[in-house]
Image: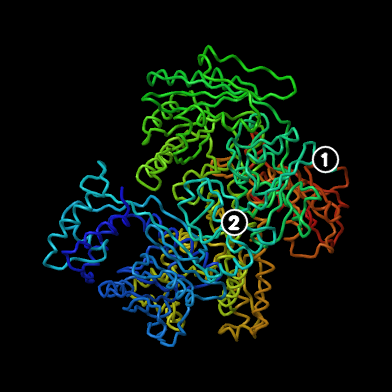
Amino acid sequence: MATLNLLKWSLQQEFEAPTWQDPMPLEDSQYDEGFKILLQGQSAYQDFIVPQLSQLLTSVLKSRVTVSVLEVGPGPKSVLGSLPSHLRRRIHRYAAFEPNAVFATRLQTWLSSSQESPLPCLDNQPDIHRTPFSLNTKTAVDPSGKEDGSAETFDLIMFCHSMYGMNPERDYIERALQMLNKKPDEGLIVVFHRDGAQFDGLVCHQTVSLPTGVTSVADDDETLDSFAQFIAGSGPKSFNGEWIDRQWREVCRALAHCDENRPKCLLYSSPDIMMAFTQRATRLPELLAEVSEASKEHRVKNREALVHYPASVVAPADIGDVQTCLTVISGGHGGQCLWPNVVALDMCAFNQILVLAKEEDNGKSPNTLVVVGAGCRSGDIIRNTMAADVTVPLGSRPSVGMGLVLQGGIGHLARQHGLASDSIAGAVVVSVATGQVLCVGNVPSQHQPADAVRLENDGDLRWALQGAGSNFGIVISVVLKACPAPEYTVRNCVIPLIDHAQAQLKLTDFNEEIAEKLPRHCSADAYLYHEAGKLHLGVNTFEVSTRDAIEPPPDTTALLGPEASSKTVDGVALFDTEMYMSAMHGGHGGGKTSSFKRCVFLKDIGSAGLTDKLLSAIESRPTPRCYLHLLHGGGAVRDIAPEATAFGCRDWDFACVITGVWQRDQDGRQEARAAMQWVYDVANDLLPLCAGVYGADLGPDPRDATLAAKAFGPDHARLAIAKETFDPHNVLAYACLLPAVERAQRLIGLVTGHSGVGKDFTAVVWMHECNTAGFSTAIVSISDSTKREYANATGADIQRLFEDRTYNEQHRPALLKYYQTQVQTRPRLPEEHFLEAVGRAGDLDVLFITGMRDDALVAAFSHLVPDSRVIEVRVEADEAARLVWGSNQDSNTHAADALNNCPTFTFHNNIVDAAGVQSAQAFCSNHFLPFLHPNLQRLRTMIHSTPKFPHPNITFRDILGLTQQTGGLKLCTSLLQSHFSGDWSTVSAIVCCESGGFLFASALAAQLDIPLALIREAGKIPPPTVSVAKGGSYISSSGTNSAEGKKVEMSREAVANGSKVVVVDDVLASGETVCAVLQLLKGGGS
């Protein structure tokens, strides 16, 4: 399947014949026709451009309330119109350069739609300039209308239809950089370009590719004529037009791929890439002035990586150089170790390997420790450690680096000693968030850098490094736990398979009679491959032996037949005994092949359904040398709990390495693409039956997203929070892909209060404060839905209802009456409007909703958004302030019309000058931002939910379960202490109820040195006591004989009259317990 770029080049060659005259530029109508064909034939916009643009715009909005956008060459419709509504509504200024007159007219009409505009919140009419985007600032028509070069600036500048005709491309990006806003945070330039682009040393902030893009074109002469002219960028003169059209059709058909599932269509490969630039794009010379560029001879083994062209590869000589670097890719394993137009780090200078005697570690570890620099390769580590008669459990490839250790590392010691990442005892890491040098875990003192710091609680970072470690910082060195160096007895056996039935029988026998019965010091790998026209099952067995006496492995001759080869080797020579290196396809294809791999974890490979899929996969291979490698697991890998490290996929018997292989001279061509796609097809076919996916090979390829959802085990939420904490700006964007955790609004603030107290003003201040703190925030009014419905029903001007306060006040009585009438026929209308407001706002960190007047708002609406924290903030103001805010009500009216419910917080908005703004900002910092602290999010991930327990309509959140997790109770206690808004020094006692409340209250009381006051069931506390009746909870009422409540009591002397106490309990459900506690404390007991 040819690419569109190859098709373009081939079409243009037809014009080079000397008998033909020069081509004619396309007219606007011709360009329009070709553009339609292109858009109709590809899904890149919905599958790639829109999702990527949504993510980038969301990141820009984290530091802005609204954004301004300049689009270069938008076509007849802006791609912005396909974004979610909550993003489109935050675009307040739009300008475009569109030189095609047909497109410009359609764009203007589309933006000025009489129905709801695609960009409904623009402050002014869009600026559509019918001229090309120019480098000449003196003659360029800037969106501001100025011609002196002092153009308006924008938050986002987009080139969504490539940059064809803009040469050199770097100059146009630099011109756009001059037009970017720098505050409150730097803006972004976004380029979507077909099949890549070179920017001559400009550094991308982020790049993402769509390698699987396909364009489909109808195979008829008229369509091909228009499409060919569009791709070539020109058309023939009339006298030779028929001839060249015929030639072009032949070229189009010759280069196209035909698919029986898409008859009468010609298919072309159209890979796309998204590149984002910031003001830092031009700073590469500054970096190279301080950090040396890597030698041109630096060796990158991975063939997939070699087709990527980074902006530069720098070679830091020390930690200071690492801290200097702009944009980094940590020790990437696989094709993502280099990435287009991004700065990569070659860590080869960090190549020390030190084996520490136990006394050097002061006896802190029972193991010998090995300090390994980030630039070391597996083969070097094995050679150096063997000299000290120890080794570390690494993977089975000598050329891979520390990226594999940090992301798992499955080798032939895994069944006995675990994964490579399990051996990580500590690490030295440069933080990409702060630039600090961090010591994580056990780093012997003599190997800690002089300026290194240790996090107060480094448990999360160490947890993340063990299995997803390339995502969280630049690793300088790793401390590994060593084990005795063994010898390996390796036996190979190859079984030709006659048919499918025999293949299934042999696989079942191999699984049940060999793999399942081997002791831990032995492992057995299997290979399914074709050679000499036949399917073969290859078996590699490995027996690990040390000086200790060990159980001999079972005899496999009866099942597998005689061995093809057997040898005893050390850890260095072991690498060459792998069957794919020594016995298959002439020994790795004679070294003239390229390969591509993905790996899934399997159990019970002998089951009929799984065996059928494996055999079908190898039969469907697109090239002769593709194969499946089943790498033996279990043993020590399974011993470690899934939640103990970021490598959470533990319960598997075999790692199935799906390997596509092709001749090296076919790199980048159809044979290579077919082999890579076969790997993905097999992996996705096995996905429903697999026990997880190996994350080490996964990268930013969109095809990896489905696989990533099953990588890393059960604790995706903890990984996401760790990423936000340790790499908040996603500097390490090209390491192993972390699954995105879908998140609703984390905090929803219902802003209430009487008219004329400044609710809208304070909500805006709070929104700005949250945005400044790095949290995406928006304000919506609950009345917006009613206004829309009212305008549709009455013909009122919807725009004026939203923007003209006087007009809105004129309609307020009619609006209220309309709403009340609607509620009578639609009792759930308040809930509908609430959910519409939440949905319209999209995926934000904070949402403020104004205009709500119902009582008990939190109780009424919080159950509708169970994954969000809902609070009510009432704004109040004294009479003097209300006069300033515009209230026409007096204090008596307010007293008579007082709201009855108790809000979460009350803000007294009595200051109306600059000091009032500061007061609102301080209120936000003290009351809202603590809800967004990463530690609170971390605590949330420790609480697991069980649906339909103990009743079908109940979701049970196991609060007590967090005490069973490392650091859970300590974290909870710290948060209870910090979130208390009062003064702990004035608290006389902490009151708690059995039994769950005892756990949390005891830890808090011990930390604060405050006495406990215990409330227990009647009869468990000696007199004198005071008691009250307590209704049954939803848990106790689920029992067989406990529907009625019981009495609870406390010692009469536990709390003195007039004392200030804090009540701590584990859960608030029906409220029966807290009501009983309050009654006891108020002296209502008997």
Residue at 43%, 68% (x, y): give it.
Answer: 88
Q: Note whether 181 is above or below 438 in the view shown.
A: below
Q: Which colour scheme appears in the figure?
A: rainbow
Residue at numbered disc 1: 1020
Q: Which sits in the foreground, 1069 or 202?
A: 202
Locate residue 917 relative to residue 740 in the image: left or right. Answer: right
Indicate the secondary structure of the residue bearing disc 1: loop
Q: Which sits in the foreground, 28 or 934?
A: 28
Query: Which percent across, then down, holds residue 756?
Result: 57, 80
Residue at numbered disc 2: 345
Query: Which percent across, then down, holds residue 747?
Result: 59, 61
* Badge count: 2
Locate residue 819 relative to residue 451 in the image: left or right. Answer: left
Query: Which percent across, then down, holds residue 996?
Result: 73, 45
Q: CA distance from mark 2 to mark 1?
A: 66 Å
Q: Is residue 681 visible?
A: yes
Indicate the secondary structure of the residue bearing disc 2: strand
Identify residue type, mark 1: Lys
10 Å crowding of disc 2: few (<14), some (14-19), many (20+): many
Q: Note whether 783 is above or below 882 in the view shown.
A: above
Q: Which sits in the foreground, 298 or 924?
A: 298
